[in-house]
Image (tube, grey):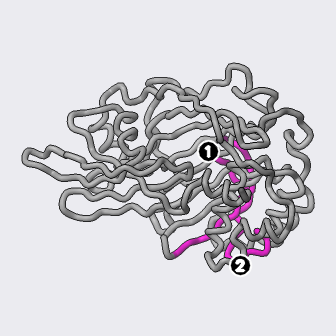
Amino acid sequence: MRASQRVQELLGPADPVGGMGLPSPKQTAHEIIERTDHSSVRLDLKAGGDVRPSLVRRPRLAVVAAVAIVVAAAAVTVPAWMLGDRTTGPAPNDSLSTAAGAELEVLTPVAYQQPDSPPAAGPMLMDLADRISDAPYDNAGGTYSYHRRKSWGARQALGPGGHVMSIAEEVETWSDSSGNGMTRTQQLMPEFPTEESRLYWEGVLEPGARTPGTPVTSTGLVGPDQPITEDPSELARKLKVGAGAGAGATVKAVNDIYSLYLVPRSVRSQILRILADTPGLHWRGEVVDRAGRTGVAVTADDTERNVQHLLIFDPVTGELLAHELVKLTEPRQVQVYNLILSYGRTAEAG
């Protein structure tokens, strides 16, 4: 099987859709979101305000997406896209848990060093491509490629008035050269794009909703069965160059590649050069991502979907730290994020 086909199977289609129904009576956030795992939903308001969802099952997808649902008698849709310390592997006893009882978080967009009239990103990306250094995994041994990601927006609950909730999720993946290995997934805490959404969902969720879920482990085919190509023309094809889909498609493809592969230094440099030649990318300068790491950022605007793609790179190694989607028009709101918290190599899975 071609490597590109394997990547497509692992990540799913570009615009997957999930959905959920509003609970009655109160439920935990995890119970609510679990109902969105494979579903799109039509919500019917019955007498007395009871909300009864009818579910349509869909396969779970690895790419992060938003939700399309219908509330009451009117169709209300949320656009669907996208889709996570950098070490050489997981730290001993490294827990994915978030402390129970933590305050529910309202997400704020990443602050740009150059928020207004940003320059074209090409010259800065070319300079970065010329000077990146080895990442810790470039010279590390080990049977398994290791990724640790945190993402938000995969399955969103949309309440009356457009109030959005989604649960952050952390995923660790160990994959050998054939793509086989292990994945450990944990649902964390609900997060919200606006204070209004947080206040609405606090009234729906029971008090125990602030407790993270139990980690779930699975084994099997969890990664690509071939290394990332080093052929420039094939790499450009994977990055949707010349496909007529715009800079946003190329940015998303970069996120997909880094979410699956340990990208060697030479390929990281090629990716930066390809991005440098991509029209529509703007340089945002130094930023701090949601994990508190300093990086350099570029953005691409998708006016058709009213979203802005954000990529954050490590300024030393050129590794991708984060990809986000933010509403393009004011007030700006985070729609999806993917943090790649760790890349590495390990001798064993788990």
For residue 304, above or below residue 61? below
Q: Residue at x 80, y 63 (%)?
A: 271
Residue lying farthest top? 93
Q: Are marks 1 and 2 in contact (CB under 8 Å)?
A: no
Residue placed most toward the observer, 176 or 50: 176
Q: Which segment is the magenta one?
A: 275-303
Q: Mark 2 belongs to which amino acid?
A: Gly
Q: Position of residue 341 (x, y in %)?
A: 69, 40
For residue 245, above or below residue 317? below
User: In front: mark 1 or mark 2?
Assistant: 2
Residue lying farthest left? 47
Helix, strand or loop at mark 1: loop
The Cα atoms of the two marked residues, 1 and 2, are separated by: 32 Å
Quarter occupied by residue 349: top right
Q: Which residue is mark 2?
A: 242
Residue lying farthest front? 1
Q: Which residue is mark 1?
A: 290
